[in-house]
Image (cartoon, grey):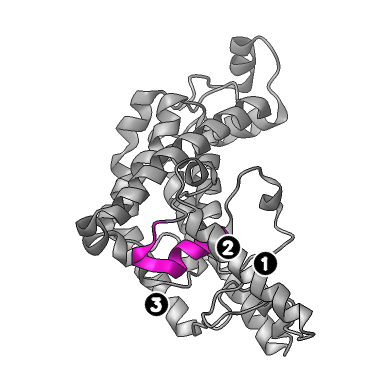
Amino acid sequence: MLPYKTIDEASAALGRPLTALETLWFNYSATKSDYFIYCHNILFLFLLFTCAPALYVLLEHLSSLANNNNKIQKYKIQPKVKLSLSEKFRCYRDVMRMFILVVGPLQLVSYPSVKMIGIRTGLPLPSLGEIAAQLLVYFMIEDYTNYWMHRFLHCNKWGYEKIHRVHHEYAAPIGYAAPYAHWAEVLLLGIPSFLGPAVAPGHMITFWLWIALRQIEAIETHSGYDFPWTPTKWIPFYGGAEYHDYHHYVGGQSQSNFASVFTYCDYIYGTDKGYRYQKKVLKELKDGVKSNGLQNGGSYNSSTDYKSD
């Protein structure tokens, strides 16, 4: 709850007039508790888990109805693997069950730790530069720590069989499978997401953006589609859907592509060699097919279901 009763009091405390965004924030949050503001995370996560993957499902479904499936299908990373709407809904249902039983309650009880590290809700609002710098820190810290936790779950037989195997039930992932995981993995991988804000605490708005962007990124990398026009193609060292899809394609034996967002850890520690070798082989096969005058619609599928660039 803001310590000001009026906008004039807030302006006097800041020594300047409130900006338009600060006025909106004041009007919305002035009489609401910090805990209520923090709990908006639950609503945001619900909307993201529900709506963002639905866009991919809707796009694929409408394209199929329009008998224009090839325009979308050519961007599907594992084109031979097709899930029905009921199978996709079942994944969403299981995600929502985990959301109700684990994610939501975890958000409700984690507020004291958020308050303790210094996430603020008051004025002034952070500048765009401050938000961007903190988000970069959050992504870098989460990516590095997530890499090692993820790698451990694959290198440790018990960890994979008892925990991480659940997430790998989708060898050809879909957007709804991004948060699909064992409850223990949900708790474990929540730690890297919290470390960034703990190291560089900022405003609640920055925290909201962090949670939203991280989930949107996870949904994109699990979408099963590698669209060439996605803006994330311009982000240096960004993995993307094709990069992470290979990790699911290999499955439990995968010792490659552990990174959650960026690719530098896999490159530094040599855990992207299988992926790079696969791309090299598929490219050679694709070039060989082209040299023989065979047309394959712009992509080559080996005896497996995996597609090269």
- 94 falls in the magenta region: no
Vertical order, 168 against 130 (above or below): below
Vertical order, 33 against 231 (above or below): above
- 249 falls in the magenta region: yes
Find residue 240 and report its horizontal and vertical position in percent.
59, 56
Q: What residue appears at the point 58 percent right and 74 percent down from the top-left corner? A: 57
Q: Which mark is residue 242?
A: 2
Q: Is residue 80 left or right of residue 88?
A: right
Position of the N terminus, as image quadrant, is top left
Q: Residues within 10 Å of mark 1 (few under 14, many from 20)?
A: few
Residue at the disc numbered 3 = 90
Find residue 280 and report its horizontal and vertical position in percent.
61, 63
The amino acid type found where label 1 is placed reads: Asp
**Is residue 103 something one can see in this rendering?**
yes
Q: Residues within 10 Å of mark 2 (few under 14, many from 20)?
A: many
Q: CA distance from mark 2 to mark 1?
A: 9 Å
The amino acid type found where label 3 is placed reads: Arg
